[in-house]
């Protein structure tokens, strides 16, 4: 007899969303996760925008992102209902601002592009930008408001997924998965008394590997997939408003400062997330240089940020891939991979869960997933 | 019968040094301290230099600082022996660097001044500066090496004082002192079970108030002293070297960057302290603007600091006074104040303890203390 219908490897937003939806679909689900804070899902900002500079020319990724942003609100509403927890969804949209004519021209191209694919985007002059966001720097030359963009509080979102999964009957085991095979998972479980970890094995009709950048470290995942996924370090800041200060921004704000993309994501509770570096490094050190650059760029966009409290600096490792696209599909019968979501894990979590549940039921995932089959890497 | 010979109010470096030395001198000593991390002694950098821009024209303070730096090494050696703990004393000295001819001229004036009072100071050209400290910015124009300056690890120093005090028989009570009177102290002791704090009283032949900026909040301290002491907020950073990086500086480095004084204090264990803001504020918030400015100024002096780990940002409140000098002496018989040490608490701790022990024995403190009698404030 098998231990479960489905074993999900990895408890970030991808793995937990899959586990929840698979359980709702009637499967007995076990989720294995090391339960550390080393999760890209916990470090992220929760910004949900289908279009940014990076999808120009990447039509397949754009189509997937558009599918994801369409799906997100209904999925999120169901999640909040199922978990009884708010995820902090915000619908004010993203205001991208520019400081010189080069930036403005780039924003104009992005606006045309948004319009060409049927998305809303409104070009605003400096005065209109500052009417929306009065604390923008006086040097703001203009901007574009993308009202379709969303954001969630990524930590509340993950917490809600966990609660929903637990309510749906998902069994969670703390452990590091070291090996996978069709229908089989081997993992080290931490021993309670501080003794050496014990190795254990579980079997299931299907195994789903959703271990983020760690997917590359699991034996039994084919080499071409392990090689395609790499950790891309990101450092990010969490600021808070001191008690006497009104909230200084209400939209997600994006800007290019000295050639670097910066984003500011506000929360209803007064948190303001400033992100993020993108470093080809495999550590989680908070470095003086990165914190400095993030603060400088944020204060260039919104000078009053200098008055906010620096509550947290954290670092995570995103699962980057060789072609910047996620990897989703069966590797062999009974072994599915759902990884490589890079900077879009929260945005793609809902449609990833949908696609995996379809695969588990021998249905076809949404066509937007077709280009992201693991087969492309061979 | 009295509860002790001496009650010391405040367990920072000043109060603890007094308690230790008073016990060594044969007194039964009780120290009362709230035991929180809200102590200027824990936030400080431990830089010990008798001369900086701020003592120009303040001859009395300069004389006191010179007395203090003379006394410090022997006191520290005795402390390390008595406590069995190293304090991290460093004797490499301070290298003050300049970036333009205005800075250089200011350093030259400081060097002349040092020479005029018999202190060592050596003018170095840019090449010599970078021979001493190879990671200094290429824009360094020159500097001055003050070999007589010292530094200690302020946290280890306080820990050693506590250990020495305990070994000498000092009894420590956790509590907030609310009132003092000649020979009497009233305090709130936290209740173990989370119930409301209880008020208690202790009596002694002598009470010594060494409560830093908090001295201004204690009933029974005369108004002119309470008004003279104010909290001056300082934010400071603690950096650490990642494992693969050699230590990038070996001297204390000072610089004026964009008009602000910055100092970098290295430790043998790879810590590097970057200080400090000086703000007329009464909170301990870590603000985005202050962290940014400290990092920018530090990286201006030593660009490789960008690679270090930002381990901690902390804020403390220094006990500033109306004339920038400490306040030491009897207020009335059996009630002594030792406060207002502002930025020089660690440096002055040894001679403050000596002076209070002299007062307790009806001797006269060192003459350098004469101008800092509380009487000057009336």
Image: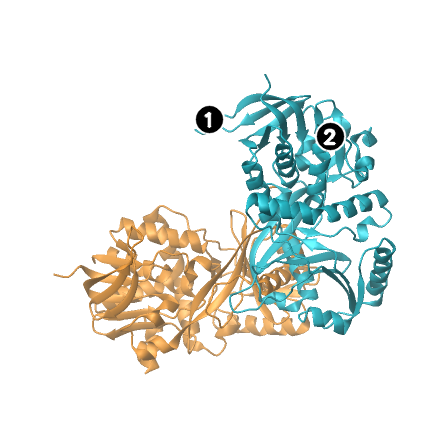
Chain colours: A cyan, B orange
Q: Quadrant of residue B108?
A: bottom right
- Residue lying farthest bottom? B378
Residue B275 percent location from the top left of the image: 54, 62
In the rendered image, the quadrant that contains the C terminus of chain A is top right
Residue B126: horizontal and vertical position, in percent?
67, 62
Q: What residue is at 74 percent from the left and 69 percent from the top?
A: A129
Q: Residue at label 1?
A: A195
Q: Which mark is residue B333?
A: none
Name above or below for residue A77 compared with residue B283: above
Residues at discs 1 and 2 both on one chain: yes
Do residues under tags 1 and 2 come within 8 Å of each other at their CB atoms? Answer: no
The x, y position of residue A296, in whole percent, is 67, 62
Q: Is residue B237 left or right of residue A14?
A: left
Q: Nearer the viewer, residue B226 or B79?
A: B226
Secondary structure of the residue carrying tag 1 is loop
Subunit of label 1: A
Q: Position of residue A333 (x, y in %)?
A: 73, 22
Q: Quadrant of residue A374?
A: top right
Residue furthest top as drawn: A1
- Residue B119: in sight, yes or no? no
Q: Which residue is mark 2?
A: A359
The number of discs equals: 2
Q: Quadrant of the N terminus of chain A?
A: top right
Chain label for disc 2: A
Residue at (85% x, 58% y) in the render? A115
Closer-to-camera residue (B262/A77): A77
Q: Is residue A77 left or right of residue A370?
A: left
From this view, report whether residue B167 is shown above or below residue B146.
above
Crowdedness of circle 2 by 10 Å Cα count: few (<14), some, many (20+)? some
């Amino acid at each position: 007899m098998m231990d479960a219908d489905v074993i999900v490897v990895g408890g970030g937003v991808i793995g937990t969303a899959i586990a929840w939806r698979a359980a709702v679909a009637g499967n007995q689900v076990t989720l294995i996760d090391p339960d550390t804070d080393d999760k890209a899902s916990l470090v992220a900002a929760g910004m949900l925008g289908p279009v940014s500079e990076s999808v120009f020319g990447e039509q397949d990724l754009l189509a997937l992102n558009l599918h994801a942003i369409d799906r997100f609100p209904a999925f999120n509403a169901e999640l909040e209902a199922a978990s009884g927890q708010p995820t902090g969804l915000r619908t004010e949209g993203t205001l991208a601002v520019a400081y010189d004519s080069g930036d403005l021209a780039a924003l104009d191209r992005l606006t045309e592009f948004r319009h060409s694919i049927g998305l809303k985007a409104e070009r605003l002059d400096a005065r209109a930008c500052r009417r929306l966001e009065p604390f923008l720097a006086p040097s703001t030359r203009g901007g574009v408001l993308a009202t379709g963009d969303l954001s969630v509080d990524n930590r509340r979102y993950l917490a809600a997924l966990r609660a929903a999964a637990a309510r749906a009957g998902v069994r969670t085991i703390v452990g590091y998965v070291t090996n996978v095979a069709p229908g089989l998972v081997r993992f080290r479980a931490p021993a309670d008394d501080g003794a050496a970890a014990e190795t254990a094995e579980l079997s299931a009709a299907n195994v789903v590997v959703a271990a983020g950048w760690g997917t590359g470290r699991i034996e039994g995942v084919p080499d071409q997939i392990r090689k395609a996924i790499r950790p891309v370090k990101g450092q990010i800041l969490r600021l808070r408003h001191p008690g006497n200060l009104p909230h200084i921004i209400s939209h997600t704000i994006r800007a290019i400062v000295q050639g670097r993309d910066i984003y500011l994501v506000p929360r209803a509770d007064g948190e303001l997330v400033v992100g993020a570096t993108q470093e080809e490094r495999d550590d989680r050190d908070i470095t003086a240089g990165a914190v400095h650059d993030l603060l400088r760029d944020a204060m260039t966009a919104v000078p009053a940020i200098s008055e906010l409290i620096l509550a947290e600096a954290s670092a995570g490792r995103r699962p980057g891939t060789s072609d910047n696209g996620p990897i989703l599909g069966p590797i062999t019968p009974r072994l599915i991979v759902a990884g490589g979501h890079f900077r879009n894990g929260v945005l793609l979590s809902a449609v990833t869960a949908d696609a995996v549940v379809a695969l588990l039921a021998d249905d076809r995932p949404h066509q937007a997933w077709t280009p992201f089959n693991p087969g492309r890497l061979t």
